[in-house]
Image (cartoon, coloured by chain):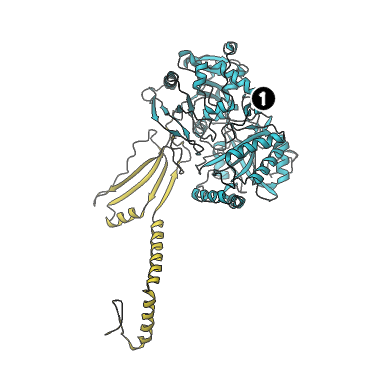
Amino acid sequence: MKPSISYRGFLLFENQVNTHISVSYFALYLKWLLNPFIMKQLRVFFLIGISVLLLHSCYSVQFKVSNGQAEPCDTEREDWLSGYCVRELDTVVKVGTITKENPINIKDCESGALHTVEYRNTFGGILLYLVTFGRKRQVKIKYVCIKESN
Amino acid sequence: MATTTITQRTWWDTLHKNGRFPLKWFLSTKLEKKEYLPNAIDRYNDAAKEIQRLLKQALDSGEGFRAIGSKWSMSSIAHQKDRMHFNSYMNIKMAISANEVHANSPYKAENLFFLQCGNQIKEISLYLQEKGKSLKTTGASNGQTIAGCISTGVHGSALDVGSVQDYVVGLNLIIGPNAEDILYLERESKPVLNNLIPKKLRAKIIRNDALFNAALVGLGSFGFIHGVIIEAEDAFLLKRYVRKIPKETALKLSDTLDFKNSDFKIAGEVDANGKPLRPYHYKVFINQYSKEKDYVVEAIYKKPFDPKYKEKYGDPIPFMKEFVYRDLIYLLIRISEKFPKAIPKFVKALSNTILPKEEKPIVGRLSEIFWDAGYQGKAFACSFGVDHKNASKALEVLTKLTRDEGPIPGIFAMRFVKKSEATLAFTKFPITCMIEIDGIQWEKSKKLISLEEYGKRMIEVLQQHNIPFTIHWGKNAAWNFPKLAKHMFPENSEKWTKARSAILSKEMAEVFNNDFLRKLGLDTYHEDDFQHLIASL
């Protein structure tokens, strides 16, 4: 099969007689596609697509108990946890091939109870999980303890 | 023993970011652990000793000292430039037993509870719930500390109940660093405790109505409120309805509170003759920019407690609550600063999320109906108290000002509260209508007046229309308005400063002073001899 059309290093093949016309159209399409202006537009769309994908894979979910008093703090936060003592855990948990992990111990709640947990999922976290076949898991949480009772 | 963390600071701010205010030292005291000091009274006394040590430090260094709670106040009432003490971890709770109650007490022992200053409304409610009891009323939410509530006069809209301070019946104050500086204060006319508990607290007992009423809403300046005794009541349920009713009906009800002869009738909330019942709570929401003929009103009726209420009516606490993105609100505010005419449109667009919706009635405990209010951004609130008979007149004056000289990014509401006995309670009218505008802070621009100017104009227009008023101590206002305290409390402002002078030494009065008090002229110290007051009984 001999190449019939070449355009910027791409070789296009004519494999059927009745594709003559369509090949010509395809060539025109490619010409349009590889036009610098169109390329720029495509890059923009591509970037938007990737951003949307990243945004969708980066989210947080919040949980809180309804029947407990959160531990208060004088902080300058401006998020939904303003006024509370917020602790953060940002680590990677490693799991062996034949072992399973135990729960992560939270030792700094003097009341012994959690009031609020915010779990964050990121694209990087998902990627890490995928490329390590689940052996490395990114943990990003914020939590607020129950206020110690007296 | 109780330990205090002292942090050097340059500034401090309120929860709703109404500052920044300069600050040198931020103090936070944690109680001794129960495992080392199991007895609650011992832990309480240990904390008292620690507070006295901190007061001595402040006194010796010639600096001020001020206790703060959850910093919900939007005014500068909680601020002290030298030392601010975070009370929230001081949260001992104790029930009072019958043998500790005064022989002439009108209160039942089972309803009396001793609460340390840092107890927050939500944890108190949960504690009382375990004992089959409830607070009588709270503010619209539950994060404030009990000492913070009474010091600033936190209220709900309980027509016939009053504010938080109105069920506080005893006060334990620390007024200085010496052994004799621990006081237990209660009304002579309604004694609560015999000598047993005050003796355990090593407190000097003062039974005096005038002093107690003055200290009750003490603006954080009547010594360190270490503990309070509250009168709770048996658990009850509240049934909440939201309705749209004609403006005229809502306003007439506000002026008269005559529910029985009103057109506002809710099926099932009527007496044997079919006349509307008087609700426990009545609140009117007003979008001052809307020309709609109806107002949204919230009416809540008190019901006997039924343990199966969740099965019958569903869970009053929503599974999840949605909020408008803060960034979106800030963006709208930034646009509003440049184009103020857009504000009414924004308020209207957001009204679905701001105003409660007409939906099926919700039934729950007091603590469930007035539940958590999450932080939703830099907020402002101005709140004026007027006699409910002047409610519609005052509302008209204030909303007209807001439209003509604003617009201001917020909406109005009216709540109604029974008169308080506290000397400086802003709920001073037989039933006070609290007219409040809540919203998001904005920056002054060429086309938009500042919050300070707006606050000043609100006072001026009420004065021009001869409407007697008070202002919520914890809200935004032009607090430096000339002779404001005297205008709001012509006689009681001096009664209050005299009572304060009777309780505190001159040196300690200065320690518990702050700029808020000075602005209002409430820092006056009277050198007269008030020993007759303190020596009472």
Query: Residue at 37% across / 51% down in the picture?
Result: A121
Residue placed most toward the observer, A3 or B208: A3
Q: Does the rendering let one see residue B191?
A: no
Residue placed most toward the observer, B34 or A1: A1
* Chain identifier, yellow in the render: A
- Residue A106 locus on image (x, y percent): 34, 39
Does residue B42 sit above or below A24 in this rendering?
above
Residue placed farthest to the bottom in the image?
A17
Q: Does the rendering let one see residue B24?
A: yes
Residue placed most toward the observer, B219 or B480: B480
The quadrant where residue A133 appears: bottom left
- Residue B73 locus on image (x, y percent): 53, 34
Does residue B315 sit above or below B280 in this rendering?
below
Identity, as a three-letter code, of the amino acid under mark 1: Pro
* Chain identifier, cyan in the render: B
Residue placed farthest to the front in the image?
B446
- Residue B252 locus on image (x, y percent): 73, 40
Quadrant where the N terminus of chain B sits is top left
Q: Give the crowd class for mark 1: few <14, some 14-19, many >=20 residues within 10 Å.
A: few
> Helix or strand or loop: what does disc 1 sit on?
loop
- Residue B54 locus on image (x, y percent): 42, 21
The quadrant where residue B394 appears: top right
The chain under label 1 reads B
The quadrant where residue A102 appears: top left
Question: Viewed as shown, does residue B181 lie left or right of B406?
Answer: left
Quadrant where the C terminus of chain B sits is top right
What residue did someone put label 1 on?
B490
